[in-house]
């Protein structure tokens, strides 16, 4: 998607772009994930909507549909059911109408072969290969094993924060068992169910961090996780912002309570 957005931003007409999509995904709107004071309502509102939907959902499919209805996530084509948990994108990618679904096997002049057949292409087509997986999904391993440290995510979609926190824990804690309790690893999501699994681990890690006052103060002051520090910027006289934070905290409790039920239902 980012390659398509770059082309659009640099003047390429949308009808000249062929977008090859092997699997459709659910996307989150980048405009709602800025986590600065200027975007306080959008960012905290997004988190609140997300947790409120989580508290109401009856299944993974129901969760995805409710996310879409509340503008928490979107899909490129409303008639196609996504099978992937996507990442951050932008709605104006929908300008591109020539979407080819399938996995590319080979390319030759004037033809693109896919897993289901071939597509005739203009002879002078420029192909941009975006098939490499930026954040590969790998099985998790214990982060602290003897003297070895294996860097992995310990908070959802926060790789740099995760690395910093692992470094802090390695420098300030001696007991490997406690280190592991503070740093349960997770893999990036690939399917909608993976998002639930990732969130459950992230919430449990947050619970562990909250029990360590010095660690919690360090997290709040860290610029790598603005979502945590942003609430602290709200002034006492900002009634609407404080009301939104109250709503978010209530939603987070209700969402976390329903998360285990959704995970169990999805596994059965």
Image (spheres, rainbow, N blue to C red):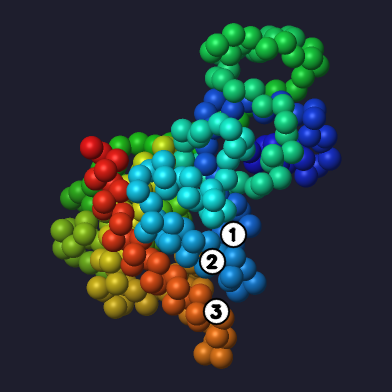
> Is 260 situated left or right of 219 in this image?
left
Picture quarter with the N terminus: top right
Residue labelled with disc 2 = 45
Query: Dot 2 surroundings within 10 Å: few (below 14), some, or many (20 or more)?
Result: many
Image position of 248 (left or right of 268): right
* Dot 3 or dot 1, earlier in sequence: 1
CA–CA distance in space, label 3 to label 1: 16 Å
Sooner in the amino-acid sequence: mark 2 or mark 3: 2
| Separation of residues labelled 2 and 3 (CA atoms) | 10 Å
The answer to whether residue 33 is seen in the rendering is: yes
Rendered image quadrant of residue 210:
bottom left
Residue lying at 72% horizontally and 26% vertically, measured from the top left: 98
Instruction: Report the Cα–Cα distance between label 1 and label 2.
Output: 8 Å
The front one of 120 and 45 is 45
In the rendered image of this protein, does residue 160 appear above or below residue 110?
A: below
Image side of residue 80 versus residue 147, left or right: right
Up/down of 34 relative to 93, above or below = below
- According to the image, label 1 marks what residue? 32
Mark 1 or mark 2, earlier in chain: 1
Answer few, some or many: residues within 10 Å of disc 3's Cα (few below 14, many 20 plus, some between 14 and 19): some
**Residue 154 in the image: x percent, y percent?**
34, 55
Q: The residue tagged with tag 3: helix, strand or loop? A: helix
**Residue 210: image tag:** none
Give the SS element for disc 2. Answer: helix
Q: Can residue 231 be seen in this view?
A: no
Residue plotted at (63% across, 57% down):
31
Q: Which residue is under mark 3?
A: 241
Q: In this view, does 176 lie to the left or right of 61?
A: left
Judged from this view, the residue extending furthest toward the bottom is 237
> Residue at position x 41%, y 37% from top?
191
Is the C-beta separation of discs 3 and 1 under 8 Å?
A: no
């Amino acid at each position: 998607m980012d390659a398509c957005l770059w082309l659009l931003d640099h003047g390429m007409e949308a009808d000249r772009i062929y977008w090859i999509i092997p699997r459709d995904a659910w996307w989150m709107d980048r405009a709602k994930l800025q986590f600065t004071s200027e975007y306080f309502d959008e960012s905290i509102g997004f988190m609140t909507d997300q947790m409120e939907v989580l508290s109401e959902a009856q299944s993974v499919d129901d969760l995805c549909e409710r996310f879409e209805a509340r503008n928490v996530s979107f899909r490129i084509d409303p008639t196609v059911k996504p099978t992937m948990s996507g990442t951050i994108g932008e709605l104006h990618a929908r300008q591109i109408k020539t979407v080819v679904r399938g996995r590319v096997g080979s390319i030759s002049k004037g033809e693109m072969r896919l897993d289901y057949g071939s597509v005739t292409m203009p002879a002078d087509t420029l192909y941009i290969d975006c098939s490499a997986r930026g954040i590969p999904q790998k099985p998790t391993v214990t982060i602290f094993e003897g003297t070895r440290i294996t860097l992995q995510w310990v908070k959802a979609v926060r790789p740099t924060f995760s690395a910093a926190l692992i470094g802090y824990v390695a420098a300030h804690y001696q007991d490997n068992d406690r280190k592991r309790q503070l740093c349960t690893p997770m893999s990036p999501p690939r399917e909608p169910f993976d998002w639930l699994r990732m969130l459950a681990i992230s919430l449990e890690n947050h619970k562990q961090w909250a029990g360590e006052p010095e660690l919690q103060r360090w997290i709040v002051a860290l610029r790598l996780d603005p979502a945590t520090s942003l609430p602290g910027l709200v002034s006492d006289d900002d009634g609407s912002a404080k009301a939104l934070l109250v709503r978010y905290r209530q939603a987070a409790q209700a969402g976390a309570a329903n998360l285990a039920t959704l995970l169990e239902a999805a596994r059965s």
